[in-house]
Image (cartoon, rainbow, N blue to C red):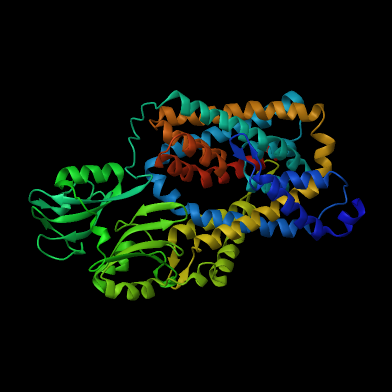
Amino acid sequence: MRQFLADYPYVTLFAVIALGSLLGMVRFGPVRLGPAGVLFAGLAVGAVDARIGPAEPAALSVVGLAFYVYTVGLESGPAFFREIRTQLPVMLGSIVALAVTALAVGWGGHALFHIGGPYLAGGYAGIGTTTPGLAAAQASSKDPTQPAVGYAIGYPLAIIVTILFLAALARRGPWPGRRDLGDGLPSRLTTSTVVVRHDADAATVPGVAEGRLLLSEYRPVGGPPRVALGLRQLAPGDEVVLVGGAEAVRAGVGALGEPAAENLLNDRNHVDYRRVLVTNPALAGRTVAALNLGGRFGALASRLRRGDDDLLAHDDLVVQLDDRIRVVAPPDRAEEVARYLGDTEAKVSEVSAVSLGLGLCLGFLLGIPSVTIGSTKLALGTAAGPLLMGMVLGRLQRTGPLVWTLPTRANLTLRQIGLLLFLAIVGLTSGYAFRVNAFSLFGLKLLLVLLVGALLSYSLLLLAARLLGQSRERGMGLLAGYVGNPALTSYANAQVRDSRINTGYSTLFALAIIVKIVCIQLVVGL
């Protein structure tokens, strides 16, 4: 059996991906391993024999990692640049916390236990659950199996410790967040038809000017329903449909009158609504206002579905390929709107080879320049280069005819394939070294160093968030992004439902990866 696994490396590789994915589905307490299951399956198979693994592991793993980090950058870039002005103090605090942790893990592990830099760098990547960090550690090490051993020890430790932190935060109740009173973004949208009881200006209804409430359909007294375009003055007896979060809708109903006996949306003779898939590349990167649905078709967008998120379609919201827009339109114009937006299922998984190839090429070029500090050479490399370029291009959305962003489903597919490929190769090529080193006194010492590092790191981040006036909810999201595992975000959302958890995660996720990569290269040089 050992000989078969060694002689047919690609059979072994994809068997590990399949078995590891099954392992990733198994629930361990409140979380699943997810893609990390492939790493541990690879370690188990690779531990059987040192000869097991792909013939060209370096090239395959670089390609897999590039797909992963570039697509992550495309998705997280807009949120990062949007949050940088308001969350800059927290970002700086996270950089300090990561640097202090790297110093503690690197210096402490080397001085107290005489552990080599590559093991410590991999462990540091593990307690940060950063796969690109593992790649950076391997690229900087003479023996790439050593960082993988540290990573495999640190990764499950990080998940367990972070969940304990999040659970403790959820139980202790909210703390004062003097600089974070909420962003007003609802976790779920709702609609309500209200009967107007007094003269009112539609623009002054609470939440409308702030983009938290939208008027989608309107029926004047004695008239037929119509799309609420250019709506200004409301009179007693008018009916109007409000769309927004539950609190915003309740405030709007209270300001205008009272809930109607019947929902105006049930009458679709004069106004229709439908979800339309955005697949027209010419529209990607444009705002809802720039779509000009009102001027073109007498229609308006009320909601936008992106992945699992349902967003209010305010004028400044940027549209991406694979978004589903809920359009309110006259029935005879609905098909025209659909053709304009695209609405072609076959295109949602299409990838522009020109923009993808050019973006990755620029990312690899960005990773080439290096700076030498002492005996250590620092570079963004094949991990941080494509990540940073993806963030910039994701922020730009498009350059002339080139659309940098990918349809959501295509982005997630490329990301998953790249990550699984990389983790399987790392596991297979490092399994034998993991077997020799992890289950020993050396492994116990490394585990102790990483445990102290994890406790220090997460505590420093939460202390910074608390001192900088962030709310408990945002603090939970910041911690999940700082550690860098989406499973932690899911766990946090299951404990406390608040949109600040997801925005906090987006604020630090990509930034933390870049900082960890720089710190990891310094730790390797010990």
**Relative to 333, does residue 75 appear above or below in the rendering?**
above
**Observer able to see residue 276:** yes
Which residue is more in the foreground, 447 or 192?
192
Q: Residue at x 45, y 65 (%)?
A: 321
Q: Position of residue 128 (x, y in %)?
A: 61, 38
In the rendered image, the vertical position of residue 419 relative to residue 517, given as above or below: below
Q: Extreme front residue here?
A: 261
Residue 185 position in % (x across, y down): 34, 45
Which quadrant of the view contains residue 369?
bottom right
Q: Is residue 444 toward the left or the right of residue 3 in the image?
A: left
Along the line of sight, the residue nearer the viewer: 253 or 320? 253
Task: Give how far across and how far down residue 236 sits, in percent.
Answer: 8, 52
Q: Quadrant of the C terminus?
A: top right
Left/right of residue 346 with respect to residue 337 in the rendered view: right
Please give the name of the residue rendered at 28% of the width and 75% of the height, measured from the top-left corner: 332
**Residue 140 higher or lower than 155, as above or below:** below
Q: Quadrant of residue 334?
A: bottom left
Could you tell me residue 94's position as x and y percent?
A: 50, 36
In the image, 305 versus 519, the foreground residue is 305
The residue located at (13%, 58%) in the rendering is: 232
Number of marks: 0
Q: Please report the residue visible at 36 percent of the width from the left and 30 percent of the height from the top.
A: 177
- Is 69 placed above or below 115 here? below
Q: Is residue 140 something one can see in this rendering? A: no
